[in-house]
Image (cartoon, rainbow, N blue to C red):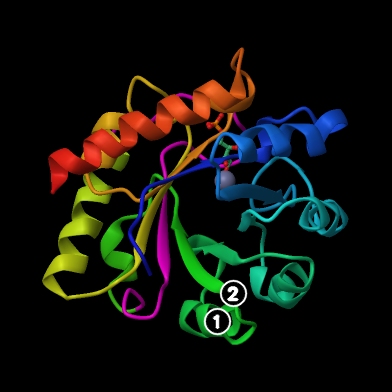
Amino acid sequence: MSHEIHILPSLLAADFTRLGEEIATVESAGTAMLHYDVMDGRFVPNISMGLPILESIRKVTKCWLDVHLMIVEPERYVEAFRAAGADSISVHQEASPHLHRTLSLIQATGAKAGVVLNPATPVHTLDDVLGLADFVLVMSVNPGYGGQKFIPAALHKIRQLDQIRRQRNLNYCIEIDGGVDMSNILEISEAGCDWLVAGSSVFRSESPATAVRDLHTRAASGRQLLA
Ligand code: DX5
Ligand code: ZN
């Protein structure tokens, strides 16, 4: 996959009474990918949104819809989320013991397949699926809630994943999720991250459009430093 830098506004932080408008605003600011969090109250303590809302969103945007499944037995819902409009689907390493099968299942639907690491899960647990994954999502907060503080140890994981893809000549994208804002995005992109999820720092800011543009500009400058 192309390693182009993207800011992915996380819809969890949007105003749900004005979801269509919120999406239009960030789309007009250059957003090409949106992040959609699914929580089941079991894998994580919180419950967020499911299939019907994704279906509605699919009808009003051309953006890539990146669906992050924070649910137990995610393999049971892969086909349904693809049918509802997901372009990429990620499942947690901690929630899917047959990861190889689950990633293959996602790809068989035509979606891109990602695997997610909680802050407590090391990169080496993915050694045997990195050749299959289209992207790896590093959690920089414990999943379940927006608005939490960035855990800096995630930077090391990004660097490790970037180094491994160079060494092994693999092509997966690297994504980060949780607490991303203007204070840390430069360091994150410099570490080798391609897809940067931003919830509160976009939708809870005074101007989500300006926030998306500013985050992108800073992330892009970090990428230049890396190259
Ligand atoms: C957390 C979710 C995130 C969340 C990020 O469990 O996976 O996508 O929306 O929100 P911020 O950017 O506010 O940490
Ligand atoms: Zn997420």
Above/below status of 3 relative to 24: below
Above/below status of 152 relative to 196: above
Assess whether residue 14 is covered by the magenta stretch: no
Q: Is residue 68 visible?
A: no
Question: Residue 215: x, y in percent?
Answer: 42, 29
Assign the N terminus to one quadrant of the image. bottom left
Asked whether 183 or 27 is in front, the reply is: 27
Which corner quadrant of the image does residue 119 belong to? top left
Q: Residue at x 73, y 32 (%)?
A: 22
Q: Residue at x 30, y 56 (%)?
A: 122
Q: Residue at x 77, y 57 (%)?
A: 58
What is the magenta range? 129-153
Q: Residue at x 79, y 47 (%)?
A: 49
Marker count (numbered) = 2
Q: Is residue 76 left or right of residue 201?
A: right
Q: Is residue 109 visible?
A: yes
Q: Secondary structure at mark 2?
A: loop
Q: Which mark is residue 107?
A: 1
Q: CA distance from mark 1 to mark 2?
A: 5 Å
Question: Residue 141: x, y in percent?
Answer: 46, 36
Whether residues under marks 1 and 2 lie with C-beta atoms below 8 angstroms apart, the answer is yes
Asked whether 128 or 174 is in front, the reply is: 174
